[in-house]
Amino acid sequence: MSEQDQQKAAGIALGSGALASILTLIATRRASGQSITPADIVGLDEAAMTALLNLLQNAQDINQHTTDILQAIASVTGAGGLQNPDNFITFRHTPAVAFTPEQLPPYDIPYKHALVVKAYHTNAGTMFIARTLAGCVQANIAYALIANEAVELEIKNSESIWVMANTAGDSVNCIVEQR
């Protein structure tokens, strides 16, 4: 239902409620033989009427703000709303020389997604990963991955990761979901 339709429905509901109240008042007064004056039908003073009109305006403002927020969310998440990614990237990286750190190739990592770095299952040695070249060669800074071990990293780009193998030919497999 569109916002205009919702506003019309709210106006109809409010008008219907007021009409029902007036008809009930008329029926009650006629049944008892009393006359009905305009003061009986409209019993709100100016302050109460102003408050009621302000309340209705605030409700319209809230509806508009809600619509704006929902449209902003839809524009960020795509027309289909929140959805799982429909694509992913995988790659394998084998450093050319043992004990020589190399950067992973550059792939953007979408927000709230993790790059999974996994030591290849046939590795004979240990893979080391770090944020810098210097950190990759320091055992107290680099993160060690043995064969078949994995780590998830929520980073912006895969090239911010350095890898080093202590055995020639060892490698890491990487996977990340894409939007």
Image (cartoon, rainbow, N blue to C red):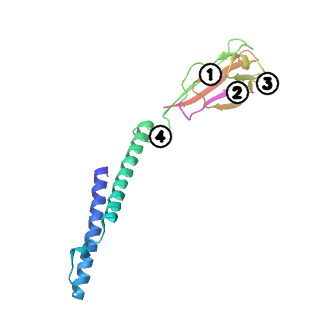
Q: Magenta part of the protein: which range?
A: 110-118
Q: Which residue is mark 2?
A: 121
Q: Which residue is mark 4?
A: 83
Labels 1 and 4: the sequence-earlier one: 4
Front residue of 18 and 104: 18
Say whether residue 21 is left or right of residue 147: left
Labels 3 and 1: the sequence-earlier one: 3
Q: Against 164, is 84 above or below?
A: below
Element under label 2? loop
Q: Is-magenta flag for residue 116?
A: yes
Q: Which residue is mark 3?
A: 140
Front residue of 142 and 38: 38
At label 3, the amino acid type is Asn
Residue sitting at x 34%, y 53% = 60
Answer with the quarter of the image where residue 91 lies.
top right
Q: Residues within 10 Å of mark 3 (few under 14, many from 20)?
A: few
Q: Is-magenta flag for residue 41?
A: no
Residue sitting at x 73%, y 22% = 128
At label 1, the amino acid type is Ser
At label 2, the amino acid type is His
The alpha-carbon separation of the residues under discs 4 and 3 comes to 40 Å
Q: Are marks 3 and 1 in contact (CB under 8 Å)?
A: no
Element under label 3? loop
Q: Residues within 10 Å of mark 2 (few under 14, many from 20)?
A: some
Q: Against 107, is 65 above or below?
A: below
